[in-house]
Amino acid sequence: MTIVSTIRHNRIISVVLLTLLATAVPLAAGAQGTTVPASTTWTSLKGDVFGQKAVEPANGIITIEAPKRAEDAALVPIDLHFKTDATSGRIKTVTLIVDENPSPVAAVFKFGKDAGVTHLATRLRVNAYSYVRAIAETEDGKLHMTETFVKASGGCSAPALKNQDEAVASLGKMKLRVFPSSAPGSEPMTRATEMQLMIRHPNNSGLQMDQITRYYIPAHFIQGLTVSQGDRLIMSMEGGISISEDPNFRFEFDAKPGEDVKVEAADTEGKKFQNEWPLQSSSL
């Protein structure tokens, strides 16, 4: 089993309890006068994900930004920034975890060796007041963690924004936006380009209820994603139910002019989607 599927299997039996915690945790925190509870869930969760490996403080190698109180628990913006200097070493993977979600591992991102990814943003579902953690693994195999506490509840069971017929009609459609770089330099591979990838997909969590039939909508989400340019990997993702509807990823990397950007994705029903865009040197 993959990390995401293993943790999903271990945690799915406690879905009902976690749904209750969506309201119970905020009340308990308020009653005790504390805004951030102890990270007891992480203590028990860490071994399931990383085994006996030590997890060190990030110390600036990776940083995370998220709203302290989410406007929409089903669309919580998460911003990650990475330091890629020679001292800290290249970041190979980043694991994104929402402690109190039914399936805590939201996604595992892997980065290409020469991709130079320095920024990654996405949107998550947050089911209850929870720590959101980003754990980076550097080339030396060490793990570095940063975290933030987000006040949100009910994100995993929140109704879909679009009805299911509309979602199926646009399933897998992609859009890529390229943002001109403001970094100095004009030679290939010397400056980062920021892109935003949007994929139409309901990313059903399995905890949402059809508002007409009152039956639960089966889980159906993007579980694999690869972004490449030419023959080199920019990043890949193994995702779970915590990635929001219509997955959205904004990232900054070292682009090479003249080579197409290709995206391939696959969901839990075996459907595959792909698209390709030319990247002109004028875009950089």
Image (cartoon, helix red, strand yellow):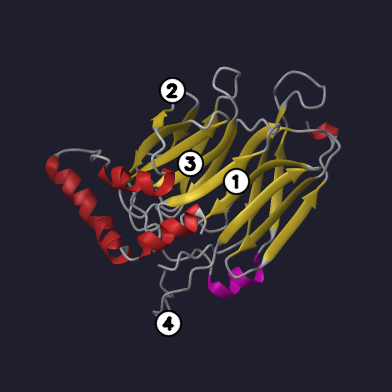
Inter-mark Cα distance, 1 to 3: 10 Å
Tell me which amino acid carries mark 3: Ile
The residue that mark 2 highlights is: 59
CB under 8 Å between discs 2 and 4: no
> Which picture quadrant has residue 111?
top right
Q: Which mark is residue 78?
A: 3
Inter-mark Cα distance, 2 to 4: 50 Å
Tell me which amino acid carries mark 4: Thr
Give the answer, above or below, for where 6 lies relative to 65: below
Q: Secondary structure at mark 2?
A: loop
Give the residues drawn in magenta, as a range: 163-171
Q: Residue at x 82, y 44 (%)?
A: 260
Magenta stretch contains residue 164: yes
Tell me which amino acid carries mark 2: Asn
Residue 131 in view here: yes
Tell me which amino acid carries mark 1: Phe
The residue that mark 1 highlights is: 249
